[in-house]
């Protein structure tokens, strides 16, 4: 489950970059409103998956509340989910 959560954290961060730096300029500079609709929907889905997997990992791995809250707060800051992904990668490596 940690590997799946790690991948979702990575893709959530990537979707944020796509939304802010590709879709929004397409909407506001080129008038392509659909770009934000599509990218925003994908990003929203990934955020929901991120939170669901965060709660599942909290329950499964008995993480302290401080880790869960840290991951949750960091996921709200654009692009910082890359840090969460790296932290999860370290956890996966330490379990081997």
Image (cartoon, rainbow, N blue to C red):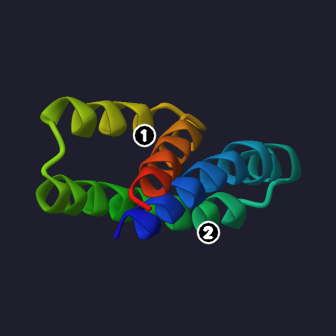
Q: Quadrant of the N terminus?
A: bottom left
Q: Position of residue 80 (x, y in %)?
A: 55, 34
Residue positioned most to the front: 96
Report the front residue among 15 and 25.
15
**Which of the two marks, 1 or 2, is nearer to us in this view?**
1
Instruction: Estimate how packed mark 1 is, as few (under 14), some (14 to 19) or many (20 or more) residues with alpha carbons within 10 Å.
Output: many
**Mark drawn on residue 28:** none
Kindly report the distance in space between the C-alpha atoms of the residues bearing marks 1 and 2.
Answer: 20 Å
Q: In this picture, is 92 found above or below 38?
A: above
Q: Position of residue 27 (x, y in %)?
A: 75, 52
Report the front residue among 61 and 33.
61
- Residue at image position (12%, 58%) is 59
> Is residue 68 shown left or right of residue 10?
left
- Residue at image position (81%, 54%) is 31
Instruction: Estimate how packed mark 2 is, as few (under 14), some (14 to 19) or many (20 or more) residues with alpha carbons within 10 Å.
Output: few
Q: Which quarter of the figure has residue 42?
A: bottom right
Q: Quadrant of the C terminus?
A: bottom left
Location of mark 2 (residue): 38
Q: Which quarter of the figure has residue 25?
A: top right
Q: Position of residue 18 (x, y in %)?
A: 71, 53
- Residue at image position (37%, 58%) is 50
Location of mark 1 (residue): 75
Q: Is residue 58 visible?
A: yes
> Is residue 43 shown left or right of residue 48?
right
Q: Secondary structure at mark 2?
A: helix
């Amino acid at each position: 489950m940690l590997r799946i959560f790690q991948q979702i954290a990575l893709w959530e961060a990537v979707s944020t970059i796509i939304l802010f730096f590709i879709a929004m300029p397409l909407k506001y500079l080129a008038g392509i409103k659909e770009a934000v609709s599509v990218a925003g929907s994908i990003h929203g889905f990934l955020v929901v998956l991120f939170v669901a997997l965060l709660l599942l990992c909290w329950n499964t791995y008995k993480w302290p509340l401080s880790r869960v809250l840290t991951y949750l707060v960091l996921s709200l800051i654009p692009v910082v989910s890359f840090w969460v992904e790296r932290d999860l990668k370290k956890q996966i490596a330490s379990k081997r």
